[in-house]
Image: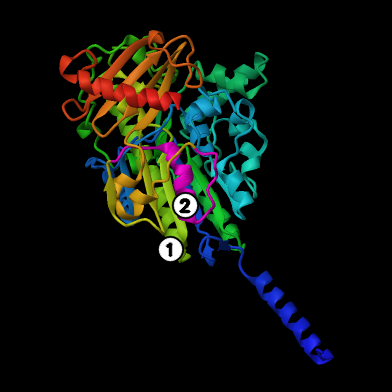
Amino acid sequence: MISMKKILLLIVSLFTLCGCNAQKSTKEIENNKVGVSVKQKNILFIAVDDLKPLLSNYGETQMHTPNFDRLAEMGMTFTNAHVQFAVCGPSRASVMTGTKPDRTKVWDLHTNFRESAPDLISMPEYLITQGYETTGVGKIYHKGSSSPGHDGKSWSQPHQLPKNFDGIYGEPIFAHYQNPKTKKQMLTLKEEALSKGKKKYGAQSKYVFSKIKPSTECVDLPDEAYQDGLYTHTALNQLSELESSDKPWFLAVGYQKPHLPFVAPKKYWDLYDRDKIELAEFQELAKGTPQYAYHSFGEIRSYSDIDSNLGVGDRFPESKQRELIHGYMACISYIDAQIGKLLDDLKERNILDETVIVLWGDHGWHLGDHTEWCKHSNFEQATRIPFMFAGPGVTKNQKSNHPVNLVDLFPTVFELAGVEQSNQTDGKSLVPLLDNNDATTVNIDYAYHQYRRQKKMGYAIRTERYRYTEWHDNDYRSFRTYNDDNIAGYELYDYQSDPLETVNLINEPGYASVVKQLKAKLKSHLTK
């Protein structure tokens, strides 16, 4: 018979145990496989708009990007990483859901995956179910702005697009411009637009931009005079709030530069001598490449200081090329400085060892190669991106040329952070490459991507040496029946002998066996 005293002691013990468990940080989760507690890691998710690997850690000696170098020393730099679709909307929908564009059904700038594929959930949305606090600042989704709260389902704390610019220089007009002369002209034109009955913001901007829309701006201002400087300031405040919680966190920071227009504080322009800037080496159309593989760079031709009559095969004047490349480089160095502030803050908080960091570009950018500008293609300069990981579980200061996909980010981050995998993803975890660089354990030897031209969809795979592309006609998608008779054209490039993609080798007899092997890989990818 148990005495009343022993019963009371047992009850007290049970309450004490429950109290201890309740006090236990929710960053501690139970690993059922091994029966031990594992600490979930924080995730710093850095997205950079229009960023190609024009960075010093990618071997670009003309670049001043010390903080990209710093991040590279902290972990892994993938040198052969590719997006799944080289334009913002599809690329971001793909990475944020961990699925291919033909699953998101986002192939343009206008579709929201919440409408085209409502069964999919986003990466931060899933993390909320795993006990995370999630928030973000800046451009993370392309069509997120069409959903309340920049895709409000993704955030446990509100996403922010701050506009608290210092009154000394005010808010950039039409989101970008701070040059006093430009702002004055645009304000006058805005009044004209209002007097003509154009009350909506879009109608006003269209009217103003038809008259004046500079592609570059160099003004001596602090970082916070432009959006990306404010994004960093906001992100640091968000980080303080996240760290006050006992939950692991996911912080997304989306930088808008080096997207057009190329506007950045003067100090970043001053890092480069325009006369010494390297222009694209190959400024011609590739021999034997289908005409529809190219585009007429309408995005940049919308700027008032660009000749709108230029098209496929036409070169920009050298002076304008130098100005644009100078601006692109200045914007990259501006973002490099913002990344440095984030890394400094993590270091000061002493949380680098418990924070997974991933940095990615949503696609590359043509800077005159093949006479092309902007993105919107299946060429190397449009699909290849910077893709970097650092933090716990990532061996420091390493590079890998293994072909990888941006869609691989989803499962890789989850494994590094100690989060149970979602069965939604189409990607492969790259952790085996991150901790021992063992490519044999990553069961894919190619990256894949696609781009649309009207009713044609160009599907491609990129191995370590080759890129093979098939242009399928009649609105084909990979969820439909694969048919050789529907293929309108092919491309093959050998990056060992022809890194600039000067010749389409698809009909060269010496490459027949290569074409056969690559076709089998692509067909398997499209039909599985």
Q: Is residue 397 left or right of residue 260?
A: left
Q: Give the Cα distance between marks 2 and 1.
A: 16 Å
Q: Which sits earlier in the primary sequence, circle 2 or circle 1?
A: 1
- For label 2, the SS is helix
At 47% from the left and 9% from the top, the residue drawn is: 474
Q: Is residue 403 magenta?
A: yes
The answer to which image quadrant residue 369 occupies is: top left
**Near-viewer residue (317 or 389):** 389
Q: Which residues are magenta?
A: 402-425
Return the x and y of residue 390 as percentages of the image width and height: 39, 54
Residue 154 position, x and y percent, is: 61, 43
Q: What residue is disc 2 on?
A: 415
Label 1 element class: helix
Residue 166 rendering spot, x and y as whole percentages: 55, 46
Amino acid at circle 2 = Glu
Disc assigned to residue 353: 1
- Please say if 152 is above or below 68: above
Mark seen at residue 341 = none
State left or right for residue 299 relative to residue 78: right
